[in-house]
Image (tube, rainbow, N blue to C red):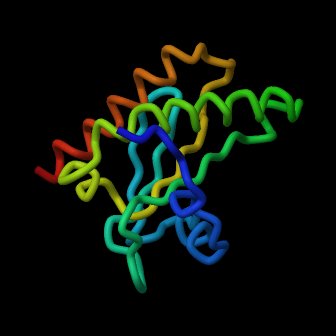
Amino acid sequence: MKFNFPKSERLTQLKIIDSLFQKDSQTVHNRFVYPFRVLYQVTPSGTSPNKPQIVISVPKRKFKKAVDRNLIKRRIREAYRLTKPFFEGDDFQALPCYMGFVYIGSAIEPYDLIKKRMESILKEFSTAKS
């Protein structure tokens, strides 16, 4: 089991990120699992990657200090990195092609809660497709 998070799994294309965060889009779906709002595209336009690509967003409106935003992003990345190997194989193909994790909590949650919610999100996606 590899617990890595390579650049190929990070969503960096601005066109796809803009389409993911576009309001009233027909191809983007939402799920709310506190402290996350998960935006995802099941069938993107163009070619789809072999592994899901994710983007993590923490709003500046709620967390003014960059230190706090970076702490939350680090915790989310680490939770995803440690959780995703359990969904590789057929379950990994069941995950959406592009996912955006938006932190909607108003306080900095502990890492244990973030990891537990990340597991529930990925489990929900893998069971929904099976």
1 horizontally vs 3: left or right: left
- Say if 45 sits above or below 33 in the image: below
State the residue in front, 63 or 9.
9
5 horizontally vs 63: left or right: left
Where residue 61 sits: x, y (%)?
80, 38
Q: Quadrant of the N terminus?
A: top left
Q: Residue at 28%, 42% (x, y): give it.
A: 87
10 horizontally vs 27: left or right: right
- Say if 105 sits above or below 98 in the image: above
Where residue 109 sits: x, y (%)?
61, 17
56 horizontally vs 43: left or right: right
Where residue 15 sits: x, y (%)?
62, 77
Number of numbered callouts drawn: 0
Where residue 43 sits: x, y (%)?
32, 73
To which quarter of the image does residue 2 belong?
Answer: top left
Q: Residue at 16%, 42% (x, y): give it.
A: 127
Q: Residue at 39%, 61% (x, y): give it.
A: 51
State the residue in front, 13 or 63.
13
Q: Residue at 61%, 47% (x, y): give it.
A: 56
- Say if 13 sits above or below 115 in the image: below
